[in-house]
Amino acid sequence: MENYVFEIDHLNVWIENKHILKDICNLKIPKNTIFAIMGPSGSGKSTFLKLLNRLLELKKNVKIEGEIKFYGQDIFKIDPIRLRRRVGIVFQQPNPFYHMSIFDNVAYALKANGLIKNKADLINAVTEALIRANLYDEVKDRLNKPASVLSGGQQQRLVIARALALKPEVLLLDEPTSQIDVVGARKIEELLISLKEQITIILVSHTPQQAARISDYVALFYDGRLVEWGQSENIFTYPKNELTEKYVAGRI
Amino acid sequence: MVRLIDLAFQKLELILNEMSEEALKSLDMLAYFKKHHTAKELKEISDKLRKLKEEAGELILEILVRYQPMATDLRFAKSAMEISYDLYRISRYSYDIALALDEANLSLDECIDADVQNNIEKVKSMLNLTIKAMLERNKDLAIEIKNMDQVIDKAYKEYFYKALVYKGGKCSIANLLIMRYLERIADHCAYIADEILFVIKGSK
């Protein structure tokens, strides 16, 4: 059981009476992998991602049925705050606190969660998070500058550093490179590959090519349904489902 | 709507078709072998196929880099690389047969025996089928080709052991060499069949 971070079965989600996720069955997310979720717009990818750290419940008129287990435990029985500390999330648009310094962006996450007792520990923890996010070398001389001076790609890595500071076991990323230039996107992809040794990464990807480059496993969502999932090598070389074949080959 | 990658694949298919026709022509020419003249022509065909193979390789590389193909597209691109090499090798073995005969100053009708003649016909029909299977992406034909390869392998082995005890001079050496080259041509047909199966079902 411990090989899987999440196990999802018979999952249905309605938002304002609209059936968004439809009977997602037997989906298992292995530990220390990059698990990509792909699919066209409106297929339910982001909704699914937000479910995994219970952010979706913050919306009004949401109805959820079915099972989501986190290390074998029903996520709806885990305190959402505790769950979110273990399962971090990064969104499409980089969202650092622009008025805060680079340092404070990361420090804030630690302080807000009461994880740091003294300044020396805080400096160490912020530095460590920036190093893990492959950002430290680029910002070490300007930690006191506002986050707004960073490029889009750097801002996204700062947001990842903020999430990593809490030492999550899982990092959810919703199309993290879609708003970023090619160089910035490549750095984030390299970062994700280096991070998977320590944490599990679940990534909503806007292109099959990106999923093929960096993911170990991949799932295709289409119109709220899970079409197919499995090892990326198999899915991208020989998908079993015709819809997957069409999607990855750009025929739909 | 035509995808950009389809236009590149059309170009690739044209190259493979041309290579198939030339490879087939090289085997046909063997049947009407006319000493030096044929060897020279077969060399030209083999050289042409080598160039086409390189052209196909460059185009495939461009397709991989530019379009990052997936699923069937990816499998076809990978297989086309192998197939172009196999077709080139088939033409090269045809030339090798002609060269062997040429250097021994023989023509096929001078000393070719019935077993060899029979195998030339079998391999020709095997290559014909291979090309048909490739064009139609026909799984059943591909399996048939693999079975035919086993028959050619067996024929070569039997001929080899027969030749070990038979003291027949240069004709027997030439025949054995031809049998060996035919066996290799059949192998390449079988490799192409493997690639066709890979394109169709993702495994060989």
Image (cartoon, rainbow, N blue to C red):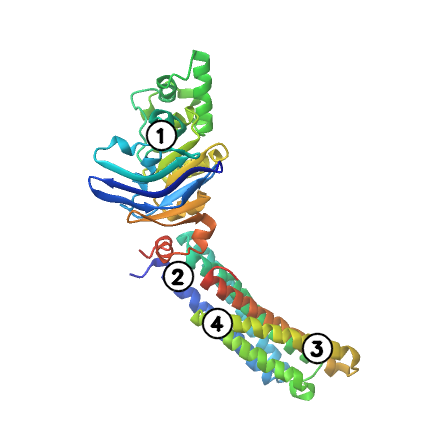
Q: Which of marks 3 and 2 is nearer the N terminus?
A: 2
Chain letter belonging to callout 1: A
Asked if badges 2 and 1 are on one and the same chain, I answer: no
What's the distance in space between the residues labelled 1 and 3, CA to CA?
73 Å
Amino acid at pointer 3? Glu
* Residue named by callout 4: B140
Dividing the picture into quadrants, the one containing residue A70 is: top left
> Residue visible at 26% across and 30% down?
A58
User: Of tags 2 and 1, which is closer to the observer?
Assistant: 1
Residue A213's disc number: none
What's the distance in space between the residues labelled 1 and 4, CA to CA?
55 Å
Residue B8's disc number: 2
Is B61 or B196 nearer to us in this picture?
A: B196
Q: Earlier in the sequence, mark 4 or mark 2?
A: 2
Asked if badges 1 and 4 are on one and the same chain, I answer: no
User: Of tags 1 and 4, which is closer to the observer?
Assistant: 1
Question: Which SS class for mark 3?
Answer: helix
Question: Which SS class for mark 2?
Answer: helix
Question: Which SS class for mark 1?
Answer: helix
Amino acid at pointer 4? Asp
Judge whether residue B18 can be spotted in this image: no
Q: How crowded is mark 4: few (under 14 residues within 10 Å), some or many (20 or more)?
A: few
Q: In the image, is residue A128 above or below residue B167?
A: above
What's the distance in space between the residues labelled 3 and 2, CA to CA?
45 Å
Q: What is the number of callouts on the image?
A: 4
User: Left or right: where does residue B169 sit relative to residue A121?
Assistant: right
Amino acid at pointer 1? Lys
Chain letter belonging to callout 3: B
